[in-house]
Image (cartoon, helix red, strand yellow):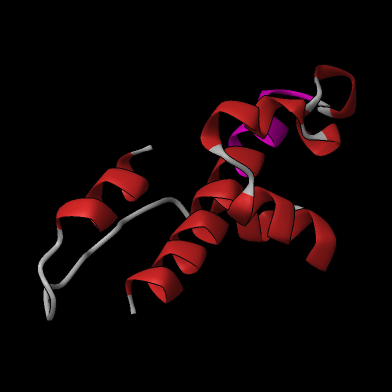
Amino acid sequence: MLLEEVGKVIKEGGSRVIISSQSWHRMKQLGAVIDEELATTPTEELLDLEVLKTENIDDTLHTYQLAKRCNVKRVMYEACRWG
């Protein structure tokens, strides 16, 4: 939600710095389709994605890594929109 709101108020030529953990690098690749879903699914619908359903999450580390993967993909998507 924060990324969407920043996109509404940032001035043309403005800069954004977004810092996040790189823990997502330690998990297996999810594939282009899942990465796109994580990047583009409306915030309020994210928990409906199959990859984020409780039965598909192994443990708290996996949860953390999925969250970081989602953050990275959403920032990449928004950065393209912000241009």
What residue is shown at x 15% (from left), y 54% (from top)? Answer: 9
Tell me which segment is drawn in magenta: 59-65
Q: Where does the image place residue 33, in percent across and percent down from the top left?
A: 83, 61
Residue nearest the observer in this picture, 18 or 14:
14
Q: Is residue 30 left or right of residue 5?
A: right
Q: Is residue 46 above or below residue 4?
A: above
Q: Is residue 30 left or right of residue 68?
A: right
Quadrant of the image occupied by residue 50: top right
Quadrant of the image occupied by residue 41: top right
Q: Where does the image place residue 81, in percent across and percent down from the top left?
A: 41, 70
Q: Is residue 82 above or below residue 21?
A: below
Instruction: For residue 60, say whether it is visible.
Output: yes
Quadrant assignment for the N terminus: top left
What residue is shown at x 59% (from left), y 48% (from top)? Answer: 70
What residue is shown at x 68% (from left), y 56% (from top)? Answer: 26
Q: Main secondary structure of the magenta part?
A: helix
Q: Where does the image place residue 69, in percent across and percent down from the top left?
A: 60, 51
Q: Is residue 81 magenta?
A: no
Quadrant assignment for the C terminus: bottom left
Q: Is residue 80 left or right of residue 50?
A: left
Q: Is residue 8 above or below residue 81?
A: above
What residue is shown at x 22% (from left), y 64% (from top)? Answer: 17
Instruction: For residue 28, say whether it is visible.
Output: no
